[in-house]
Amino acid sequence: MVYMPELPEVETIRIGLASLLPGLVIKNVAHDWPKSFPNAPADVARFMVGAKVLGVRRRAKVLLIDLSTKYSLVTHLKMTGQLVYVGKKRFGAGHPGKDLVGDLPAKATRVTIDFTDGSQLFFNDQRKFGWMRLIPTIEIPEIDFFKKVGPEPLDADFTVQKFIERLSRRKNSNIKAVLLDQTVIAGVGNIYADESLWAAKIHPATSVADVPKARLVALYNGLIEVLKLSIKKGGSTDKNYVDALGKKGSYLTFAKVFRRNGQPCPRCGSIIEKTRVAGRGTHYCPRCQKESNE
Ligand SMILES: [Zn+2]
């Protein structure tokens, strides 16, 4: 099964790396696959080697490592990307796989960054869809991806009014597809869409226009709650995820419907079903989440 990191997983990576990387100075960079590291060697020599890490940020599912040269390393893990820091402490996060805890560099290692203190950051990516780009920090908001991506659901100014306004832009589409649309809201993927729709008692195939406002308010609250809970638990994959302390993420053990098909709904006891909505495997309770449930 392919595991695509969602907002809480990337946020967990950010929290881990933000506690380890700032202050470190890059000594050397090696890579083995141009598409994973599409940067001009002259830029790497000038703006990366010798640079100090200032901070680690996240926008949607993209990680930003800001450097003292006013450049940033912009990393998208895509389907199989991982970032693993090896120093006095070890921190690995991203796609499941033995490289999170095994010897590095490994076969899937695309980029190795050596720091002057002897520690290393590895970007592993088996399928090579991910990338790490060196971009002037000031230009990041102008990149196509960042221009198109919707607001951050956990930002303080992301109010319920804003949430409903964003969803209403696609009022004739089914609500699950709209939640998954990164241009509507940033970072929400399959797990958090299913969980928040269950929390709000909305059938995933309902058109946005047909969902009563009170349910949209419940959806907003449910979404914020599951995202926060998952970050607290260190991401969603119960067995595949190692956080800054080597502790595994445990959110899926708290999931109410996601991958719980065949099991009783924790709210009403009906058997959770799995179907397909918006092209994705979708888990829901047929009793709690009726198509017209006003
Ligand atoms: Zn139910």
Image (cartoon, helix red, strand yellow):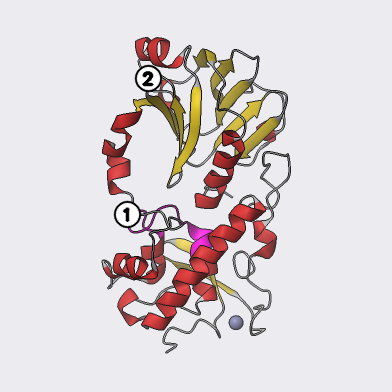
Query: Helix, strand, or loop for circle 2?
Result: loop
Residue 68's quadrant in the figure?
top left
Tell me the residue that label 1 is attached to. 183
**Is residue 99 something one can see in this rendering?**
yes
Q: Amino acid at mark 1?
A: Thr
Q: Which residue is found at the position 55% from the left and 83% from the top?
A: 288
**Label 2 within 8 A of ligand 1 by Cβ:** no
The quadrant in which the C terminus is found is: bottom left
How far from the left and from the top, in percent, is residue 278?
Answer: 40, 64
**Label 1 within 8 A of ligand 1 by Cβ:** no
Magenta range is 180-193
Up/down of 8 relative to 201, above or below: above
225 drawn magenta: no
Quarter of the render that holds ligand 1: bottom right
Tell me the residue that label 2 is attached to. 39
Answer few, some or many: residues within 10 Å of disc 1's Cα (few below 14, many 20 plus, some between 14 and 19): some
How far from the left and from the top, in percent, is residue 61?
Answer: 45, 45
Residue 126's quadrant in the figure?
top right
How far from the left and from the top, in percent, is residue 282?
Answer: 51, 67
Q: Amino acid at mark 2?
A: Asn
